[in-house]
Image: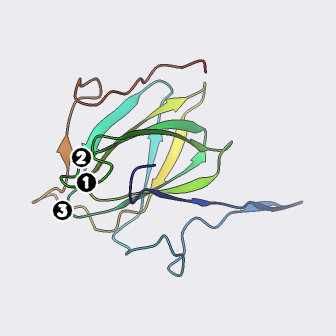
Amino acid sequence: MIQGVESKQLARHADERGFLMELLRSDDSIFTKFGQCYVAMNYPGVVRAWHWHEKQDDFFVVVKGMIKVGLCDMREGSPTRGEVNELYLGENNNILLKIPVGVAHGYKTIGVEPSLLINFPSKAYSREEPDEYRLPWNTDQIPFNWEIEFK
């Protein structure tokens, strides 16, 4: 795993009314700082990649559907620089994923229904000075396969 990437297994507490699932708590060891919270709805097959931050961590949770997440360590001097990881988040794998500063990331909704991703970035978005650095989803600089793979 890329250094600094962490995950927290989430637990659904279900009864006859439905379920409750805590996503992120300020007393979690994975927590750093609250900046803002947003939800993104994503259509099946759409790739949202690649970008990274130099000032904030992202905390992804998928509460509906499934996504394939790609990660690539872009940090100078990191012992895992250039390492690429692939993870699956969503209804079939309820985890909170911490993506640290300097790790490029992107995702693709898999399956036949839209996904709902909630992000808790550690800094609020600044329209005047966006903390976002981008590469195209199909760049040759990151060896990642967005297609369905049979393993």
- Please state the horizontal and vertical placement of residue 19, each as a whole percent of the image: 77, 60
Residue bearing mark 3? 126
21 horizontally vs 107: left or right: right
Say few, some or many: other residues with alpha carbon within 10 Å of mark 2 (under 14 / 14 to 19 / 20 or more): some
**Among the two numbered marks 1 and 2 on one chain, the one whose residue lies closer to the N terminus:** 2
Q: Amino acid at mark 1?
A: Gly
Picture quadrant where residue 99 is located: bottom left
- Residue at x 32%, y 35% (from the top left corner): 49
Residue bearing mark 1? 102
- Please state the horizontal and vertical placement of residue 84, each as a whole percent of the image: 38, 38
- Residue at x 25%, y 54% (from the top left corner): 102
33 horizontally vs 50: left or right: right
- The one nearer the camera, 47 or 114, is 47
Q: Amino acid at mark 2?
A: Met
Residue bearing mark 2? 74
Can you tell which of label 3 and label 1 is closer to the viewer?
1
